[in-house]
Structure formats: C-alpha cells, structure tokens
Amino acid sequence: MDKSNGEFRHIVRILDTDLEGKRLVPYSLCGIKGIGRRVAQTIVATAGIDPRKKMGELSDDEIERLKVAISGAEKRLPWWMLNRRRDLLTGEDKHIMGSDLMLKFRDDLNLLRKIRSYRGIRHERGLKVRGQRTRSTGRKGMVVGVIRKKTLARAGGGKGGASKTK
C-alpha cells in the first residue's frame, strides 16, 4: 500500500462528523447526515479520489479535496438528487448536510405546529402523520390489550359475574 502521509487514520473528521477510516471512501461518507450512497459516489468522482481506497488511507491533500467537493456538491448534483427542493422560505433548490439538516427539519416541524396544520397537530400529539391506519397499529405508550370477561367477573365489575337479587 502506498501511504503518502505514512499513517493510517482510524477516524477522519469531515463536517463535524467522525467517519470510519477502515471503510471505503464512498461508504464512509454515508456517515454524514444528508449524504447517501449515490451522492457520496458523485462527490468522490468530482473530487478525483479513487473510490476503492479506504478513508484512513487518504492524504491530507485528498481530504481537503473531498471537503471542497462536499461544500460545492449542490452545484454539481442534478436537481432531482437534492434533498431540499423548492425551499419554503426562499424557493431555491438546496442540498443540506450535517447538523444543518436536523436544524432545518426541526424548524419545518415547528412551522407546521405554529400554523396549526393537520400534519403539525398530528406531530404534536405523537400520532401517525402520513395517512397510515391507527386502529390496530401505532399503540406505543398507551395501554394495550383487551380485558377478558373472566377477569372482569373476578373483579366484580363485569356483566357476567353479577347475579340479580329481588
């Protein structure tokens, strides 16, 4: 193996995220929020890095090229590959990565709650949002189960156990 920096890095830090050094470069980039396999392969190709290399084998120069490619990925990706098309406030097509993605997601949910939309109310109450059935699924957190007649009869609260007296 040809190592220009002379050492193997077990952790490489890009976009405030620790990436595994023992994984291949495209798959290691998938550890960053907002970067999937397809976007990672596009970024690696535009940076001019061998996709068969492991992340820990990259030199400082190659890591810098990777960071530049990640920062300019929005311009190189086609519109259908972007994760934030027609932004609510600006109307632009964007690709958000890292911690910014979670902040935007939280802001979107807060906006839905604030304008009291149906989806926002469902999010507030912890119910299903996208039209799924709720009759028999999604019962986490609540009391689940059916009280049997025999159990009710023993407790004295059911219909079957009480006898009529005149």
Image (tube, grey):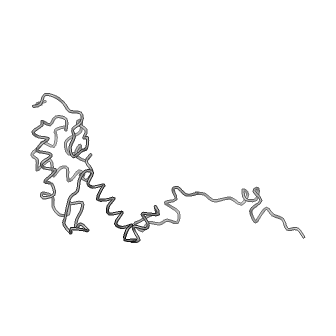
Q: Residue 44's spot in the image, x, y percent?
A: 14, 47
| Rendered image quadrant of residue 75 | bottom left
Taking the spot 33% from the left edge, 59% from the top edge, the residue there is 106
Nearer-the-camera pick, 42 or 64: 64
On screen, residue 158 above or below 115: above
Task: Please identify the residue farthest to the top as the structure is shown.
Answer: 6
Task: Report the number of discs.
Answer: 0
Judge from the rendering whether residue 154 lies leftward or rightward of residue 74; answer left or right.
right
Residue at horizontal 24 percent and vertical 62 percent from the top: 84
State whether residue 34 is above or below residue 93.
above
Judge left or right: residue 24 versus residue 64.
right
Q: Which quarter of the rendering shows the C terminus?
A: bottom right
The answer to whether residue 25 is left or right of residue 107 is left
Tell me where residue 158 sits by quadrant: bottom right
**Left or right: where does residue 133 sit relative to residue 2?**
right
x, y (%) of residue 10? 24, 33
Q: Position of residue 138 (x, y in %)?
A: 49, 60
Q: Quadrant of residue 87?
A: bottom left
For the N terminus, the quadrant is top left
Task: Give the residue displayed 73% in from the left and 57% down from the top.
Answer: 150
Identify the residue at horizontal 21%, vertical 69% (top origin).
Answer: 91
Q: Please identify the residue farthest to the front as the structure is shown.
A: 114
